Image (cartoon, grey):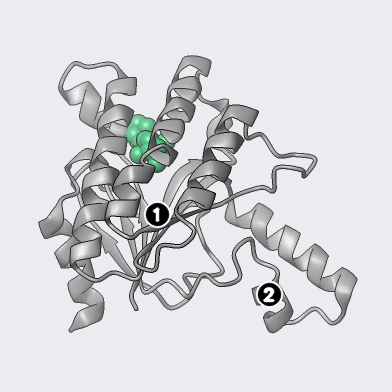
Amino acid sequence: MIHVGCIMDGNGRWAKRRHLPRTEGHTEGEENLARLVRVAVKRNVGWLTVFGFSTENWVRPRTEVRHILGLHKKLFGRVAELNELNVRIQWMGRPFDSRDARTPRYVQRAIRKAIADTASNTGMVLTVAFDYGSHAEMVHAAQVAAAGGPLDQASIDRNLYLPELPRVDVMVRTSGELRISNFMLWQSAGAEVYFTERPWPEFDADELDAALALVRE
Ligand code: FPP
């Protein structure tokens, strides 16, 4: 089963080009993710993991942060669609009860409800990284691992936020940025990387197929 990771960049630039507020770009980005989930299911992708909001994104203007949080509530509210597609949704990020966690309660509630309401689906697994950073995850995994026994690769693997997440096969980054940022650094060792000039709201079925071709040849 193929695991695709997506760094959904370029919502702001997409909006700017259309003389729209940045928030419109994020709205379109969330809509596009919903479209892409449908395509990924058709392509028999096993795991789709997206970078929804990073531990670094909290410094953005407050209105933009609030808008993106609202879009996460919307995304996790798409339970009927996910059930129709047999998609199970998951979340990963700084644990809600940890000292530095920032996820507000209303987003926590939406996340918990969506996870519970799609738990019995057996098809693709959609994982949304929210308040997520790879460095925070690795420090967390190392701390828990070291407290419980020998610190080695296997013990770190077992203590990542979602230990059942398989290795990433292909990592996508949109909008012409040739960087990986702080996203699944541990899990994407050895992954193919697909970079495209297209901004996230325009990442369509043809683009996904081009990314999948890197691992399906
Ligand atoms: C980058 O665009 C995108 C993000 C801050 C994270 C992804 C967010 C979305 C796709 C919107 C909502 C999505 C979900 C999952 C609910 P940018 O603002 O960095 O674009 P820019 O680099 O052009 O400014």
Furthest residue toward left? 206
Q: Residue 180, image x and y in percent?
A: 43, 56
Residue 105 to residue 145: above or below: above
Of 196 and 44, the residue lying toward us: 44
Foreground pick, 113 / 138: 113
Horizontally, is 160 left or right of 189 in the view?
Answer: right
Report the residue at 33% width, 60% height from top: 86
Is tag 2's residue or tag 1's residue first in the polypeptide sequence?
A: 2
Residue 216, percent from left and from top: 21, 81
Quarter in which the C terminus is drawn: bottom left
- Horizontal and vertical percent position of residue 132: 57, 48
Label pair 2/1, CB-CB below 8 angstroms? no
As displayed, is residue 47 above or below residue 50? below
Q: Circle 2 is placed at which residue position? A: 158
Number of other residues with Cα within 10 Å of mark 2, as a class: few under 14, some 14 to 19, many 20 or more: some
Determine whether the beta carbon of the residue marked 1 sits less than 8 angstroms from the nearest atom of ligand 1: no
Q: Is residue 196 left or right of residue 112?
A: left
The local secondary structure at tag 1 comes to loop
Q: Amino acid at mark 2?
A: Arg
Disc ID at residue 51: none
How crowded pointer 1 is (Cα within 10 Å; few <14, some 14-19, many 20+) is rated as few
Give the residue type at disc 1.
Arg
Residue 41 lies in what quarter of the image?
bottom left
For residue 177, say whether it is visible: no
Q: Quarter of the image holding residue 33?
A: top left
Residue 90 screen position, x and y as percent: 50, 55
* Ligand 1's quadrant: top left
**Frontmost residue, 27 versus 125:** 125
Residue occupying the point 56% across, 33% down: 107
Which residue is the site of mark 1?
Answer: 179
